[in-house]
Amino acid sequence: MVNTKPSDEEILKGLGVLDDEEQSDSGPDVAFSVDRGPSDEPLPEEVSDEDLVFDASELSVFYGDFRAVRDVNLRVRRNEITALIGPSGCGKSTVLRSFNRMNDLIPSARVAGSLLYRGVDLYDPRVDPVEVRRRVGMVFQKPNPFPKSVYDNVAYGPRVAGRKKGLDDVVENSLKKAALWDEVKDRLQDSAIGLSGGQQQRLSIARAIAVDPEVLLMDEPCSALDPIATARIEELMAEIKSEYTIMIVTHNMQQAARVSDRTAFFSVELDESNDRRTGVLVEYTTTEKLFSNPDDERTENYITGRFG
């Protein structure tokens, strides 16, 4: 089954930015051209608008008056795996959740700066956060299958979206993409709770894929898995990145080096006046360069084990 991605105009309408009656005189390509935001920094390697999925500029995340992460500049490319690494408490997961507005569910959280998804400001008041989370799916650290059958877990999202026909095909294709079909095709009506941890995590990926997102966010998806299950998830990411843009938070530097195309290293700054720690993005570049020849001494110290 071919994974047909929505047009620029469909994304604008879906996110609530463009009403059905609103049509750009210049067509959707002009209406959806990527705004670079406040940063004048040139794009490395001349990233085209078509290849740029996210453009975060001076992004900060606050919990109340506490700034948990500050001034993140991060450009994420289509069909690549971007890894976020760094010590505990540096804000990796907080930043990741900003990319599909999961932080909105925390009453004290707010985001400052600019975060564009294919040229659309994700935090524009007109943008529907539910639609954002459909287009930008998320897989959490701990497998979280619903107490339903394997089939109903995968079909849940499409059903909520109002789909009634073709669910069998959606379930089968999603499970195949998650490399789980052969293991569960004869157990579709069994409870998902009975699957192994690695199978449950792949089921969570299948459930995210079932609503046809463009992006998959993964928050330490292998931290609770054994090495064999971890290797299968890593193989799966490599297999599906041709169809999805993937961002992964991981504490495992070897995993980041194995699976990602680009890596962002985060660290922490300590405010000695109040003993609060704020996350900062230290360096963001190709994975090969970051692990072999980092520009910042803090990056080198972390990947060589001298701190963190």
Image: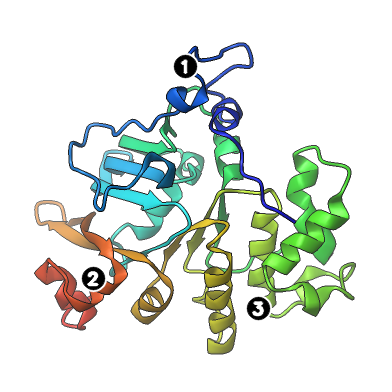
Q: Residue at x 61, y 44 (%)?
A: 5
The residue carrying mark 3 is 197
- The foreground one among 193 and 59 is 59
User: What number is the disc on residue 13?
Assistant: none
Q: Which mark is drawn over residue 26? A: 1
Residue behind mark 2:
290
* Secondary element type, mark 2: helix
| Badge 3 amino acid | Gly
- Between circles 2 and 1, the one closer to the viewer is 1
Residue occupying the point 56% across, 30% down: 15
Q: Amino acid at mark 2?
A: Leu
Q: Position of residue 226 (x, y in %)?
A: 55, 86
Q: Position of residue 254 (x, y in %)?
A: 36, 81
Q: Is residue 91 above or below residue 179?
A: above
Neighbours of disc 1 within 10 Å: few (<14), some (14-19), many (20+): few
Task: Please say if 300 is above or below 100.
Answer: below
